[in-house]
Image (cartoon, rainbow, N blue to C red):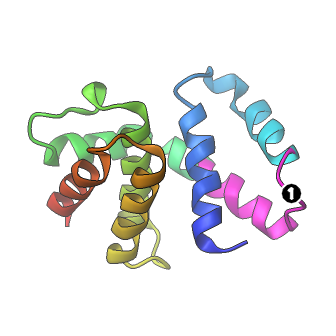
Amino acid sequence: MGRRELREHIFRLLFRRDFFPEEEMKEQEAFYIEYLADPEQKEVDYIVQKTEKIMAMIPELDTMVNEHSVGWQTERMGKVDLTIIRLAVYEMKYDDDIPVSVAINEAVELAKRYGSENSPAFINGVLAKMI
């Protein structure tokens, strides 16, 4: 499984966070992982660990986003866009293995696939203000 596919699985798990209580997220992770097509254990570990790290930092990530997004606080953003932004901000600020330009590019690609027509430009604009 490549980095892009791993990132997409992380996005999908993070997206679930806004729809399930925190105490159910472990169960949601297990349910999601169960239906992956023969993942290697290191891939499962990567997906789960990174998802949990990001979820633990959501208040901090949202604070950073709110400081840089003019007129669009996180509580007004669409869930898909917000989830992609949180993932990208985490990668930009805390994942030394991923260059900032790659984190932004991958966020825009996720937005093209999962977001609305305006999502790629919106996400690119928010993330560009953060660098």
In this view, the residue in front, 45 or 7, is: 7
**Percent position (x, y) of residue 66?**
20, 40
In this view, the residue in front, 54 or 104, is: 104
Q: Which residue in the structure is indicated by mark 1?
A: 37
**Horizontally, is 89 left or right of 122 in the view?**
right
Q: Which image quarter holds the N terminus?
A: bottom right
**Horizontally, is 95 left or right of 105 in the view?**
right
In this view, the residue in front, 36 or 94, is: 36
Q: Which image quarter holds the C terminus?
A: bottom left
Q: Amino acid at mark 1?
A: Ala
Residue furthest left as drawn: 70
Question: What span is in magenta?
Answer: 35-51
Residue at left offset 52%, top offset 42%: 56
Quadrant housing residue 28: top right
Residue furthest front as drawn: 117
Residue at left offset 65%, top offset 63%: 6
Instruction: Count residues near mark 1 (Cα–Cα under 10 Å), then give few for <14, some for 14-19, many for 20+.
Output: few
Q: Is residue 50 above or below residue 92?
A: above
**Percent position (x, y) of residue 37?**
86, 57
